[in-house]
Amino acid sequence: MFKKTIGAILTTVMLLVLVSAFGGMSFAAPGDIVYTNNVHDVSLTIPACGTGLYIVYTNNVHDVSLTIPASWAGLYTVFENEYGFSFSNTRNKEAGYGGLLFSIQIRGEVTEFGSGCRELLHADGKYFYAVFPGDVPYVYDNAELTREYTTMEKDIDGILKTFQYQAGHGLPFTDVPKSEWYYNDVKAAYEIGIINGATDTTFAPNNNLTYAEAVKLAASMHQLYTTGSITLINGKTQWYQSYVDYAKAHDIIFGDYNWNEAATRYGYIEIFAHALPDEAFTEMNNVPYGAIPDVLMTFAYADEVYKLYRSGIIQGVDDARNCNPNAFIKRSEVAAIITRMMNEDARVKFKI
């Protein structure tokens, strides 16, 4: 049943983006948690699988909601005021201002701010300013306080990126413009928490996928499909080890790859073909054995290639439906594959 509903879940971000309801309607599945702004008749829906992981703050004056990870609750106190949201932090009390860290102010039009303005966001006709108190640059002579500030700065950037996404800016990646063919695929894979950026602000769409990234994606898809959520996290020594262990335990892979090397097309297909249960690969295309020109049936990975062709997940690289198995695959191309893996409606029907 999960495979039939995953298309709806594709609208939910890793940090659980704001979902506005039109005319008071809220599109929630059974068990989902719905927060309603009673002033502006707008709702925010969080899937039941995210319950307890996130905290929702709603500004009833400006019709904006903010969602932050629950783990941040021990670091910040967030309170609503007529301007938006303000964050206080006990670590910042030594800098004065009663521990006020920064605030997000919401304006209906562009307003001039001094150098204390951290960043300007714009969405849906509203302007959002992350404002630091005064012009204090937080330059400390004390080494310990300098380390504290460095930590605060990183946390603040995380909050701003979350708020910026919720404010309607879409993906946080500066190298994935909406005009690119892969934008919607990257967005869909990012929103369900399967794929991340190369950094917080870049996706690196033209970089080759590595085997380490491939096994992470496969393990995440398997866990999401079978349990409804992703709880896997990076390993402590080798970041990919937790995903490798999961993949081996669930018969996704049956040995080790050169994890830091670029994955070939047949290499990632070998892994992805076992990332979901067999019932997830419903055949929709008639692809007889021997029909793919450059994949001989004597090849060790032939069955996996035919499996993904027949289920409409891959369709070949040219009109002849060649697989080009020894070529590398880009991260942007993999985003399209993930979308088709997790959403049957996105799969491709073709003849060969």
Image (cartoon, grey):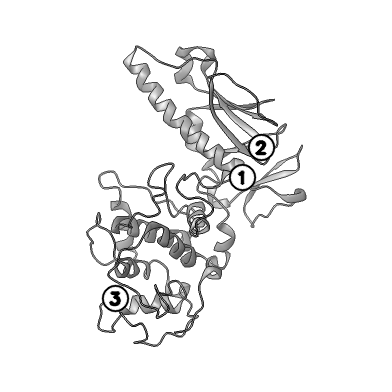
Q: Position of residue 131 (x, y in %)?
A: 56, 24
Q: Which residue is mark 1?
A: 18
| 317 shown above or below 179 | below
Per the image, the residue denoted by label 2 is 64
Q: Give neighbour class at mark 3: few <14, some 14-19, many 20+ (Cα, 10 Å).
A: some
Looking at the image, residue 19 lies above or below residue 246? above
* Residue 309 position by quadrant: bottom left
Q: Residue at x 46, y 63 (%)?
A: 336
* Quarter of the image with the C terminus in it: bottom left
Crowding near pointer 1: few (<14 within 10 Å), some, many (20+)? many
Asked if the residues shown at circle 1 and circle 2 are in contact, with their CB atoms under 8 angstroms apart, the answer is yes
Residue 201 percent location from the top left of the image = 44, 42
Q: From where the camera sits, is residue 251 visible?
A: no
Q: Which residue position is annotated with label 3?
A: 301
Tally the marks. Answer: 3
Under mark 2, the amino acid is Val
Point out the tag, 1 or 3, that comes first from the N-terminus. Answer: 1
- Residues 227 and 294: in front is 294
- Left or right: 159 with respect to 127? left
Q: Residue at x 42, y 71 (%)?
A: 277
Q: Residues within 10 Å of mark 2 (few under 14, many from 20)?
A: many
Which of the labelled discs sits on residue 139, or is there none?
A: none
Distance of mark 2 from mark 3, alpha carbons?
A: 50 Å
